[in-house]
Image (cartoon, grey):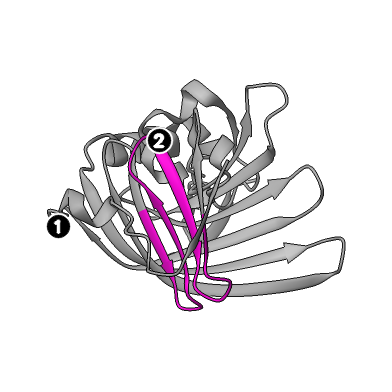
Amino acid sequence: MASTSYALDTAPVVTAPAVTAPAAAPTDAVTTIEAHYRELVDLTAKVLQKNFLKSVGKTQTFDGSLSIKKPGKLRLEYTNGQIIVIDGKEAWFYSKKSAQAVRRTFKDFEQANIPVAFLLGAGAIREDFEVSLPEADHPLMLDLVPRRKGAAMKKLRLLSDATGRIVQMIIFDRSGNTSDIRFSEVQEGVGLDDALFRFKVPKGTEVIEQ
């Protein structure tokens, strides 16, 4: 019902009811994110990652630095001595503590099980995921469910800023584990050298082929 107020001459003044803006559709946020990452060439960022392991009820926290370059190149260095490098065809997983490096070839980034690698394909979200808006009051938060049957990832939750830049992602796997990854100090279009994405095996490291 419209509210009524009175001026000094007691003539009624009718105030129109407030107009509520329509809720944002998930496609609005997806379009913005896809446009942002479709134009992206490379980026660097700081990463804070929290992995919750349901089987033991514990959370592991990692932090490090991320470098990404299209097409298909990634380098993730954690402060605990672990390094992941993708050159577009194969991935290296190195642990300084165990002095081991695993070399693995793969068909896609999900198969490689490297959550941050999602950013390399964020320019085409709707091709691979069903998208929904989990909370109407948070139009920049999206839930993505893989279209492919048997995918290791059960759901991916994204939070972006108004420009379409992803600032947080939470991966839910089918075993009840989650990986919460937050990005900060993001720099885009920095002109990264391809040499950064070629892994050099440290002397004395055992190489395991998979």
Across and down, in percent, residue 56 comes to: 86, 68
Observer able to see residue 25: no
Across and down, in percent, residue 88 comes to: 34, 37
Residue occupying image coordinates x 70% and y 21%: 149
Quadrant housing residue 152: top right
Above-or-below relation of 72 to 179: above
User: What residue span does the magenta drawing correspond to?
Assistant: 75-101
Inter-mark Cα distance, 1 to 2: 19 Å
Residue occupying image coordinates x 43% and y 72%: 64
Q: Tell which of 59 and 88 is nearer to you.
A: 88
Amino acid, disc 2: Gly
Instruction: Indicate which disc, 1 or 2, sits on the residue closer to the N terminus.
Output: 2
Question: Which secondary structure, mark 1?
Answer: loop
Above-or-below relation of 137 to 148: below
Q: Is 93 within the magenta?
A: yes
Residue occupying image coordinates x 24% and y 57%: 196
Looking at this view, name the residue that lies furthest to the front.
204
Across and down, in percent, residue 26 comes to: 52, 35
Q: Quadrant of the C terminus?
A: top right
Above-or-below relation of 77 to 188: below
40 sits left or right of 102 in the view: left
Observer able to see residue 127: yes
Q: Is 121 within the magenta?
A: no
Q: Quadrant of the N terminus?
A: top right
Query: How would you rate the neighbour count of disc 2 (Cα within 10 Å): few for under 14, some for 14-19, many for 20 or more?
Result: some
**Residue that badge 1 annotates:** 190
Amino acid, disc 1: Val
**Residue that badge 2 annotates:** 121
Residue occupying image coordinates x 87% and y 61%: 55
Q: Main secondary structure of the magenta part?
A: strand
